[in-house]
Amino acid sequence: MPPNTAPTFFGVSPVLSALRNTLIRTVSGVLVISAWPHATSAQYPSDWTAPFPAFRVTGNLYYVGSQGLASYLITTAEGHILINSNLESSVPQLRESVESLGFKFADIKILLISHAHWDHDAGSAAIKAMTGARYFVMDADVPVVESGGRSDYQYGSTPSAVYPPTTVDRVLHDREEVRLGDVTLIAHLTPGHTKGCTTWSLRVRNGTQELVAVIVGSPNVNPGTSLVRNAAYPQIQADYEMMFRRLRELPADIFLGSHGGYFGLEGKYAQMQQGVQAPFVDPEGYRRYVASKEAAFRAELARQLAAPPQ
């Protein structure tokens, strides 16, 4: 979730929630998404569902998300990798974006996520059903994914934060590699926002250069998150400290993230359309962003430490 965005609430009974596992059906040989009475776009931040042009970032790395919810396609001769399935309602948009670039959605072989919050992984069950992709998730986020968000330490009892439980095909661990064709991604455990929050890095071509692209999981402290005396997540403060240390140490040439606002998607895309070369190559912007988020974390931590125990 983005900063300063509280979860939305709407009523969905457990019985109806279970029925969402049947959201995929075939009509006249065409795979479509069934209608479901979940939150409307008006109940989400508007940029989460606002369309955005799919485009090549550089090399074989493409942006295929919405204006606010980032998703990435990494292409290879042996099939493709998709990072982030976004909302359940995002799946048709993701398919349209992938196919607008000339690729087949069915050629997605591996599905990854940045972290186990519904705005980044609720569409995973549908995408697995549509493509047969194998789903790889960082170990500490696996219970949340496979419970459909119900075991999330903060949002498990929030109706709008649950989604179809999705089986994980491979459990990832810190700094483990994910390979397909000639592509290698590294899964960096950067916990705090979720217990298994993952920042991805990979080497990509930018003309004659080989650069490191970094897709930041999330460094945000969401409203209502307890950083002290958190019985459901006792190590949360230490995890945030570790996350910022790792992000500071991570070399990053191309700065990307799980929300477009993290890395200035709209402004940089506009520059690209105006002929600016490689606007997403932004190591200084990456360092500034990490520093600003760490400062925000420390300010919130100090505020909570100073508050009397509840």
Image: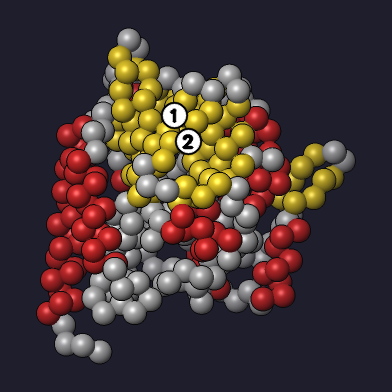
Furthest residue toward top: 208
User: Whole-percent x and y of residue 281?
Assistant: 27, 27
User: Whole-percent x and y of residue 163?
Assistant: 59, 63
Q: In this figure, which residue is indicated by the disc labeled 2?
A: 178
State if disc 1 and disc 2 touch (CB < 8 Å). Answer: yes
User: Whole-percent x and y of residue 273?
Assistant: 37, 23
Q: Residue at x 23, y 55 (%)?
A: 242
Q: Residue at x 65, y 30 (%)?
A: 107
The image shows residue 11, relative to residue 167, as above or below, that is below
Q: In this figure, which residue is indicated by the disc labeled 1?
A: 184
Disc 2/disc 1 C-alpha distance (Å): 6 Å
Q: Nearer the viewer, residue 210 or 174?
A: 174
Callout 1: 10 Å neighbours few (<14), some, many (20+)? Answer: some
> Looking at the figure, which quarter contains the N terminus?
bottom left
Splitting the image into 4 quarters, where does residue 146 fall? bottom right
Q: Which mark is residue 308?
A: none
Left or right: residue 3 compared with residue 122: left
Q: Is tag 2's residue or tag 1's residue first in the polypeptide sequence?
A: 2
Left or right: residue 253 compared with residue 148: left
Furthest residue toward right: 28
Q: Nearer the viewer, residue 52 or 118?
A: 118
The amino acid beneath tag 2 is Val
Q: Residue at x 32, y 60 (%)?
A: 192
Kind of element beneath mark 1:
strand
> Looking at the figure, which quarter contains the C terminus?
bottom left
The amino acid beneath tag 1 is Thr
The image shows residue 77, relative to residue 193, as above or below, that is above
Residue 118 visible in rendering? no
The image shows residue 21, relative to residue 187, as above or below, that is below
